[in-house]
Amino acid sequence: MLHRKLFVAIAGLILFLSMSSCATYSCGGPSGGHCYATVSWGKGDLQETDLRGFITVVTPVQLNKGNLVINDELWLYQQGTNTCGLGACWAEVGVTSGACSTGTDTRYFWADNTSSGFLCRDLGPVQPQEFGQPTMLVIARLINQANAFEVDVEPCARIDGGTVSCPQRPMSANSTGNPMQPNVVTIGTELGGSSGANAPPATFTENWHPDHFFAGAWVTTTGSPQVQTPPLQGSWTVNPSVQTEGGTWTTSCCQ
Amino acid sequence: MIKKQIAFVAIYLMVGAWLGCSRQQQHGPGPQSAAPGKPPAMDVSRLGKGSRATVPVGSAAIKPASQSVPSFTVEAAREYVMAHSFPAFAGSKGQKPAITRAEFLTSKQVTEILRGASTGFADDQLLCYVELKGPFTFSGPPNTTVTYPRGIMIFHAATGNFVMSGGIP
């Protein structure tokens, strides 16, 4: 009888542990070790000899940073160099809960790591009418200005000119003193911390890269996905290899 | 009897794992085919020409104590920074980053400290610049971090909003 009670108690404990282990995750801390649900393209994947920029259209969703940070964003960077503060040079732009802000709400941000250091700017909260609507994220080399990139967030805007039901309010900035020769572009979700984060599915569509003459092309290859499941999910829900406007990369967290 | 118990535990584990993790294992719909892509309608010729910079709005942080500019004291900024830990701090556990500099500066002066990096504000905009002793580590794209010896937090001198942060050499 005693054995049976002990046995039930142990089984119950195992059940509890198996359930609770899924409420937490191991996505590093402030100093790195973050989890990603991303897809990346090298400039060769995009058949570019000079990767001058990239545009994606994200649908902002309510992000909850849990105990650290979660972002849906676009990165353009130069992998394999240590020319910016003993690290790679990059620029990033997107939607965050927890980056460059002490609050927990969902905000637009952009950041760069250049010879000046790493700097993160808070562009303010996502407006209620902007959730679920297309928001264009742009990073592109500035013409006739050395070491400088244009970084834009354009809520309620699409590349293809499709109708959007909320008013546009473009935000623009320049990443200056940025000596990168970009060789990789990445889109998707970054999660840092160990518990409490949440992000409903967000889509990255109209993935497009300008060429040397600022004409350009939709992405047509699936690139290199990197998805740490659990706690993140990420997949191509519309394959870019069929004839589409850059496919649809969909990510979510901790659902 | 032992076999029965082992089977019972195995079933319990399977049910537990299913209950606990099934929601996390859900995937979105599989890839679909889509309508043929249209060429971009956006005026791509404007790309790379730059636009007027948007100033960082920031988030509410230091409560203004007056209508003047600055609307708060350097001491109030110090108190805010000490009360809100800088998550990128990579020092020893239990240790807090020390404030090494806190003062009101124009945006132009901050840009000089930042080796030319623009704050996004007009040159004469007054900002509250706070510098901390690190190290501070920041995450970038996958598999990329960078560490700096000094951290910075910048506040708008009129609103008290926290507008910008980072690490510098």
Image (tube, coloured by chain):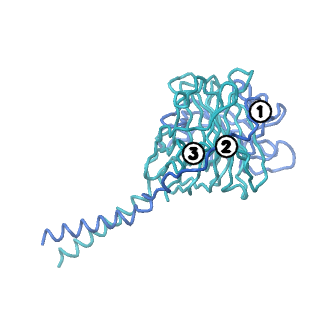
- What's the mark number on residue B46? 1
Please give the chain letter of the residue carrying mark 1: B
Query: How crowded is the residue under tag 1: few (<14 C-alpha within 10 Å), some, or many (20+)?
Result: few
Q: Which numbered mark, 3 or 2, is in the foreground of this view? A: 2
Query: How crowded is the residue under tag 2: few (<14 C-alpha within 10 Å), some, or many (20+)?
Result: few
Q: Which chain is cyan?
A: A
Answer above or below: position of A52 versus A156. above
* Amino acid type at mark 1: Arg
Looking at the image, which residue is at 17% across and 79% down?
Answer: A1
Q: Is residue B76 visible?
A: no
Give coordinates of residue B56: x percent, y percent: 74, 41
Q: Is residue B75 left or right of residue B8?
A: right
| Residue A23 falls in image quadrant | bottom left
Q: CA distance from mark 3 to mark 2?
A: 12 Å
**Label 3 SS:** loop
Q: CA distance from mark 1 to mark 2?
A: 19 Å
Please give the chain letter of the residue carrying mark 3: A
Q: Nearer the viewer, residue A29 or A21?
A: A21
* Amino acid type at mark 2: Lys
Taking the view exactly as shown, the residue that stands out farthest to the front is: B36
Q: Which chain is blue?
A: B
Q: Is residue A95 visible?
A: yes
Looking at the image, which residue is at 54% across and 33% down?
Answer: B135
Q: Which numbered mark, 1 or 2, is in the foreground of this view? A: 2
The answer to whether the residues at label 3 and label 2 have Cβ atoms under 8 Å apart is no
Looking at the image, which residue is at 23% across and 76% down?
Answer: A5
Query: How crowded is the residue under tag 3: few (<14 C-alpha within 10 Å), some, or many (20+)?
Result: many
Q: Which residue is mark 3?
A: A247
* Amino acid type at mark 3: Gly
The answer to whether the residues at label 1 and label 2 have Cβ atoms under 8 Å apart is no
Q: Is residue B155 left or right of residue B98?
A: right
- What's the mark number on residue B38? 2
